[in-house]
Structures are given as structure tokens and as C-alpha cells.
Image (spheres, rainbow, N blue to C red):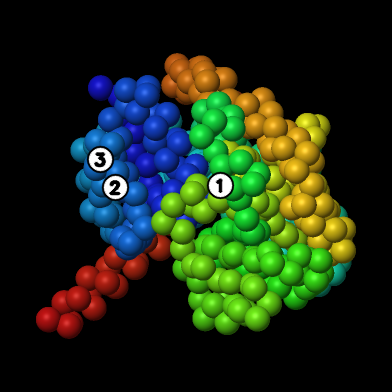
Amino acid sequence: MKTLLVIGYVWPEPNSSAAGSRMMQLLQFFLSQNYKITFATTAAETVHMADLGELGIESVTIALNNASFDSFIKKLNPNIVLFDRFMMEEQFGWRVSNECPNALKILDTEDLHFLRNLRELEFKNQLSITTFLSDLAKRELASIYRCDLSLIISEKELQLLVEDYNIPASLLFYLPFLLEPSNAVDLPEYEERKHFVSIGNFRHQPNFNAVLYLKEEIWPLIMKKLPKAEMHIYGSYPSQKVTQLQNIKDRFYIKGWAQDSRKVVSNAKVSLAALRFGAGLKGKLVETMQCGTPSITTSVGAEGINDTLPWNGFIKNSPKAFADTAITLYTEKDIWYDAQQKGFEILNIRFSKTEHTLRFADRLKYGIEHLEAERHNNIFGQILDHHLLKSTYYLSKYIETKNKLESTQNK
């Protein structure tokens, strides 16, 4: 039987973040290809984590800087190892190469972390950085080179890697969200919906900044024209600085985690995603389209989603334009329905599960069959893999020995 080991950064939480939904889509894909899956992570369990056992996926907790992983993976002997974000490849990639050299190594970037970091720096410092090779960028790019294939969720990021950073296209594979066909069947009609909604994991800094932007600059403009409308903010892990943003007088409500985000968004009339920095695909906006809820977002929010297709609402970058179009979308029934249909078109054309899974299955088959030749051509990756193995090996052994000594002394 074909086997897959996923080394997760966190336990997947599909109702909390786009990253959680993305991971579940990948797991479903490999199940459909008849892979026996083991999901391993160093993270602590969470209240919102998915029940992988229901899918027949084995869950394992692994330890950093511990030789127990070596015996674990050697016994498992997977055909494919999927790293959930580059940090997991840094920690465990060299051990995989050492114990299971014939396993196909795949990196799921989720989004480019260094790009998100760059945009946050640009936003906070109000400057434009044209050439950027931070330590974070070097680490992430090195991880891409060391893997046999890296999954890139956004065409914009794929283009950036190839054109600006000269990453060989053969090491990259464009794989966006994998979605079933969408339509308006069984969704609430315009008259049945009310209020505005915004949703996003609050551990993600761009989401908190977007809510702050809504409260301080956009919502005051909207509530003057729509005195009965309310702004409902949903998201997992709201900190005190988030909950303090609630203002009942201004009808600005912090709702916290949504157990059923689809229901929440489907009952809203308009979705607002005032993102000013970030990277990857914004799952909250894709889910909004699935719920038939038109949206207003920024160019950052829309990046990689619609390509040249019309947006399911409006893309605006100034507070006044954002607020004005939100009011229009909220009050004009015909414009609302037209926007809803545009959302379904984007989903069905850009995120077809059938189309993208066929492409991915073909690429995996080719990668497995031509693994030796592909690695031979990736000379830079071999060099980086060699040096990471040597340097990380000795550091890990040092930490492992130190932990053993401390454990002995504490007994």
C-alpha cells in the first residue's frame, strides 16, 4: 500500500483557518489516491482540531531534536513525506533524507511566509522594498530547493519565485484550493440576509489589522448611512485586544469563534475583508463566495483568487471607496445578485477540484517515477540538503544530549 507521512506545523482546524481547510483538502486528495496516511506533529492538541481518526488517518505526536523520530520514520518507510510549511522541513527534512532517502519530499508552503513578512514591514514603515532577501526568505527558499516539489497556492507567488528569485519551475507546482462546484441552491436569498460579516483567525496578524482598520476608518462611514446594520466580527483565538474592540453603541460586535462559519457567512448580506497586507489565497473570501455572499476587499485580499474575472462585489483600497461600495452592495438587490453569480463563476473556473486533482495526480506519478533524475538535476538542492544534514545533525545531537543530562539530574 502507498503511504504518506504528513509532518504538520499544527493540528488542522478547518473551521478556524484557511490553512486548516487547505490541509484537509490535501488529506482528502491523498485518501482518494488510496494512500495510507499518518499525520505527525509536535504541536499540542487544540479544542478546534479536526478528528482525523474519522477519516482513517493515524495521528502521532513527535518530538523535536529526538532520535525517536528516526526509528519512527524508518519503520513507517513512507513513499511520500509532506511538510506543512518550511519550518517543519527545516526540523525534520534532514532526518527524512537520512532514514528514507527514496521518499518523495513535498513542501506545502501554505503561503510564502517571507512575502507576508515583507508586506507587513512595507505597511508598517510606509515604504516599498524592491529587492528583498531577508534571513526568513533565505530559509524558505532553501527549503524549497531541498524538497522535490513545493506546492504553491497562488499564481502570483509562483511567478514571484520563478521570475524574481530564479527558482526552477520544475520544483514548483501551482495547487490552489480544491473545491466542488458552487451555486445558489439552498442558500438564503437577499431578503433573508442581514448585517455585515468579517471572519478570520486572530492569531494571524493581517486579520487583526483588518478588523482594526474596519473599526477605525471604514465602519464609521457605513453606519452613518445604514443606521440599523450591524458589523459582526468572527474569528478563532480572539485576544483581549480583539475583544476590547467591541462597541455595542456603534453596532460593532466581536463574536469570537464560529462553530459553523458557513452558516454565519451565509446569513450575512455582505462580507468585508479590509486586508492591508498578507500573502497566499484568502480562504475567508473563497468561503464567502461559496456562501453566495458578495464581498468588498482590497487588492491584497483579492490577489490570486479571480485572475481577470470580475470580482463578486468590489475591490477598493481607500476607506471611503470601500465604505461607499459596501453600502451600494448592501442596498442594491440587482447589484447584489449579479455579484453573487460572479463569485460562483470564479469558484467554478478557478478552483475546480476535478481539474486540479487530475493535474496533481499526474505530477506526483511523474515525480515518483523520475525521482532520481529530478534530484540529479537539482544540484543546488543537493548541496543545501547536504549542509543542512551536517549542521543540523550536530546541533540536534547536542540538544538531545543536553536534554538527557537535564532529565537525569532532575531525577
The residue closer to the viewer here, 28 or 236, is: 236
SS class of the residue under badge 1?
helix
Q: Residue at x 29, y 44 (%)?
A: 52
Q: x, y percentage for residue 375?
A: 52, 28
* Quarter of the view holding residue 113: bottom right
- What's the residue type where badge 1 is placed? Ser
| Residue named by callout 1 | 266
Out of 111 and 269, give the one closest to the viewer. 269
Q: Secondary structure at mark 3?
A: helix
Q: Mark 2: which amino acid? A: Asp
Closest to the camera, between mark 3 and mark 1, is: 1
Circles 3 and 2 in contact, beta carbons < 8 Å: yes
Q: Give the Cα separation between the discs numbered 1 and 2.
A: 25 Å
Residue 410: give x, y in percent of width and height.
17, 83
Compared to residue 60, the image places residue 406 above or below, namely below
Which part of the image, by quadrant, shows the N terminus?
top left
Residue identified by numbered label 3: 54
Type of amino acid at the residue the image marks with label 3: Glu
> Mark 2 — residue?
51
39 left or right of 380? Answer: left
